[in-house]
Image (cartoon, rainbow, N blue to C red):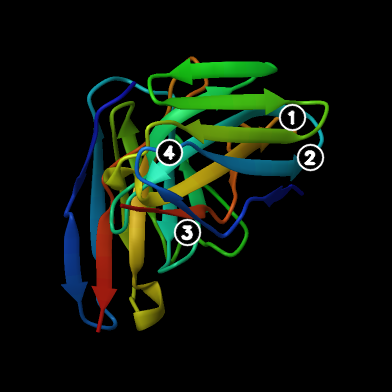
Amino acid sequence: GQNIDQPTEMTATEGAIVQINCTYQTSGFNGLFWYQQHAGEAPTFLSYNVLDGLEEKGRFSSFLSRSKGYSYLLLKELQMKDSASYLCAVRAGGSYIPTFGRGTSLIVHP
Amino acid sequence: SAVISQKPSRDICQRGTSLTIQCQVDSQVTMMFWYRQQPGQSLTLIATANQGSEATYESGFVIDKFPISRPNLTFSTLTVSNMSPEDSSIYLCSVGTGDGEQYFGPGTRLTVT
């Protein structure tokens, strides 16, 4: 099976930068996803990393280190609307289907 | 990416009844999935909807309780049968694209009374 670990909750200030970490233990790693989910809504795709390194998309960046079993999602210039749950999901073992972590609830305050 | 719609968006149903949820995608996709997300929990995969054959169910989910149809590459249905309050959840359709990405529909919020 897979073990995916991310912090339960984080708080940050509007305008600041926050880094949400995700560590995983798996065999046959084949990709890592980040999703944003606002309360009562469906998850929204943010990023998909297969190779090591940093991928930037506007205010959001995602980093992957396969050798360390580690990823992070970096959110810059935080806005109140960024308050949401952020889900890390790992695809591994030849399966197309990712396993989801429990999510990190991010609270952005003024 | 893919644009996914689900119907209904929400429903309140009585114990013992069944509800069929529809998922429509704006393009042909090979992979379609059904997930459940109970309050405060992460996503749990119910099954993979296979076009032209029976769905592949995850451990803990059975066809009699969650029958799934997938008549073509853009459409699928999930039925929640003989509902109980424990089935109250958000049900999400998801699709996988050719480049490995995976997207979710808006979800169906089900409350069973």
Residue bearing mark 2: A26
Residue bearing mark 3: B63
Q: What residue is drawn where x is 33% and y is 60%? A: B90
Q: Residues within 10 Å of mark 3 (few under 14, many from 20)?
A: some
**Secondary structure beneath disc 1?**
strand
Q: Is residue B31 above or below residue B27?
A: below
Q: CA distance from mark 4 to mark 3?
A: 48 Å
Badge 4 vs badge 2, beta-carbon distance below 8 Å: no
Looking at the rendered structure, whether the residues under marks 2 and 1 are on a common chain is answered as yes
Image mark 1: chain: A
Q: CA distance from mark 4 to mark 2?
A: 33 Å
Where's residue A16, x and y in %?
43, 38
Where's residue A37, x and y in %?
37, 48
Badge 4 vs badge 3, beta-carbon distance below 8 Å: no
Q: What residue is drawn where x is 40% and y is 33%? A: A45
Where's residue B22, x and y in %?
23, 47
Residue bearing mark 4: A16
Residue type at tag 3? Ile
Q: Quadrant of the C terminus of chain B?
A: bottom left
Residue type at tag 1? Phe
- Of residues B2 and B84, the one drawn nearer to the viewer in this rendering: B2
Q: CA distance from mark 2 to mark 1?
A: 6 Å
- Of residues B107 and B26, the one drawn nearer to the viewer in this rendering: B107
| Snapshot quadrant of residue A54 | top right
Looking at the rendered structure, whether the residues under marks 4 and 3 are on a common chain is answered as no
Residue type at tag 2? Thr
Residue bearing mark 1: A29
Residue type at tag 4? Ala
Tell me: B22 left or right of A72: left
Q: Is residue B113 above or below residue A57?
A: below
Badge 2 vs badge 1, beta-carbon distance below 8 Å: yes
**Secondary structure beneath disc 3?**
loop
